Image (cartoon, grey):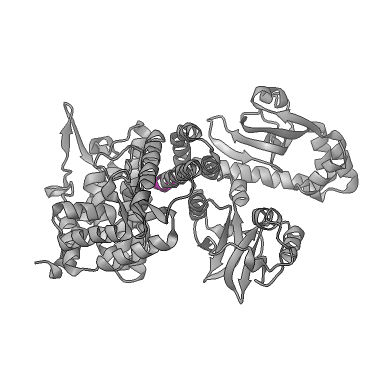
Amino acid sequence: MTDSVLDFLHRCAPFDQLSGELLEYCRQHLVLSYLCKDNVEQIMPRDKPQLYLVKQGVFDLLDSNNQLIERLERGDLFGYPSLLTKRPITNRLNVIEDGLVYTLSQPAFDRLCQQDKSFAGYFSHALGDRLLTESRSRVGHDWTQMPVTDILERPLISVAPDCSMAEAAETMTAEKISCVLVSEQKELLGIVTDRDIRSRVVAGRQSFELPIRQFMTSPVISVDWQAPLFDVMQRMTSHNVHHVAVLREGNPVGVITASDLMRQQRSEPLFLVNQIRKASQVEQLYAIAESVPGHLHQFANRVVDVHLVGELLASFTDAFNVQLITLYLKENGPAPGPFVWLAFGSQARRDQAMGSDQDNGLLLSDQTEDQDLDWFAGLAEFVCQGMARCGLRLCTGNIMATNPQLRLSLNGWLKNFARWIDEPHKDALLRTNIFFDHRRVFGDRRLYEGFANQVSRMAGNQIFLANLAANAADQPVPIGLFNRFRTQRIGVNEQVLDIKKNGIAILNDIVRVHALAAQLPFASTPQRLRTLGENKGMSVRDSEDLLAAWRFLVQLRLQHQLDGQVSDNLINPDSLDSLTRRQLKAAFRLLKDAQEGLAMKFSRGAF
């Protein structure tokens, strides 16, 4: 081994704190090995504890129950618990990407610990953290709700917009960071990453003396400093970015990177989305899609709020959508005009469940020529069929972009919404419950914003809102006199209720009416409820109660599907424990109260 080993160790804690003499001793005793699926047991014998340091590759460290402990990449250490406790090795390694690892024997490790207390202390703390993590996992500690500030380690590093690219690159090198924020008088203007430097400056043969404002990405994907880690992960997966700015009262205070999440052992969804975005053929996407249920099960087992599985599934769906569109563009050339791939329903709300079907459409520019329509029809067919192969069923109601009536210009869509609003018969109300939950997945942002703003203004029609409210208030909630469940018989004896149709959908309908009245610009039910509580669209207590009920109902449905390996929404109340039955009855009573309140609030506009 050469001095490159020392250079590598200088960048890896705790080796970077060793004296020159101990560092040289370490260099002499490190053994570099190629690690792949075929030689894991040879490199990691269970009867011979060693310290392992990853130089290259990606590996999953799994416990005895096959649960993920940590994803390991360059610079990560493992093997030290057995070295310190002298207990048998029970964990195993799953090779994700073949790579290289350094191994350090037990005697060499012991000598370094004996001669350097800080070195020994590092591993003692690491062992304590590992045991604490495993203990929290066993008792249901939910990392998804950990605030981003808990892992925001570095202070803010930013530059002015007139800073040259050369100065920015020097700052990034000196600070050992992969991005730098661009700000002026505490206002966040943009971001430049090491990838931007390679693709926009070096590959573009641009001068490093040009100001950074010419190369920065704007606007910057960001989260509030008190946001939970799940929000960071969701933004990374949705926007395909590896850096998210952290804001406090609108001012930048730091950056969370994908590597930060990986170090927190929360990288599996990011890794899967990255695989999706790298797929160059549809067959690769189909193969990746087969692993999605396993990822969802693993994620559900590691969080308390199982409803987050729906958000994660929507992020995966978005990624498959985007990549299928990208592959179509690659094969058929650029689009003949601006367009937007629209998601409706559960994908738009980010509350998908196992077995969800597709609800989507295409928004086209008003300048789209007739001869260009075949191109968009081909796109719709390619994406919808591809999504079906990826596990998202074709919609039996034909709410898909393959339907010419849902592949319209901006003016065409607005005419449809105007008709549904002006003539709110039963079918029109059913359609508005689907189409008023919309979100841009891919395409022209300005075109979508124009569509969304006009639809939002149209939805303020008081008569329409009154009819929409009356329809939501009339939906039967399965709780009757004497607080008893109203069930339906399936099979010979089993009595069940449809948790989606008679619970979640009703709650979504109620919240949608309030959100349309307040002209809120998003489809997510939790986001709508939080904003309604903040903006006095409803009382804080009502918004919090409905949010708690929504989380409970969604969690109950997902847990039913995950536990039973089924995609239906039929729950037998008798199969629930007594506490869950009481909670379900309370949620249903809350829904009935919310229906009454909705009818009273909006009845003034009805005929």
Main secondary structure along the magenta-highlighted residues: helix
Q: Is residue 559 magenta?
A: no
- The quarter holding residue 538 reads bottom left
Q: Residue 579: x, y in percent? A: 30, 44
Outermost residue to the left: 607
Q: Residue 603: x, y in percent? A: 14, 67
User: Which range is magenta?
Assistant: 305-312
Q: Residue 24: x, y in percent? A: 89, 41
In the rendered view of the protein, which quadrant contains the C terminus? bottom left
* Residue at figure coordinates x 63%, y 46% from the top left: 129
Answer yes or no: is residue 586 visible.
no
Q: Against 573, is 546 above or below?
A: below
Q: Residue 573: x, y in percent? A: 24, 39
Q: Is residue 309 magenta?
A: yes
Question: Between 2 and 44, which is closer to the camera in this rendering?
Answer: 2
* Residue at figure coordinates x 53%, y 50% from the top left: 240
Q: Is residue 220 left or right of residue 107?
A: left
Answer yes or no: is residue 494 visible.
yes
Q: Against 188, is 112 above or below?
A: above
Question: Between 113 and 388, which is closer to the camera in this rendering?
Answer: 388
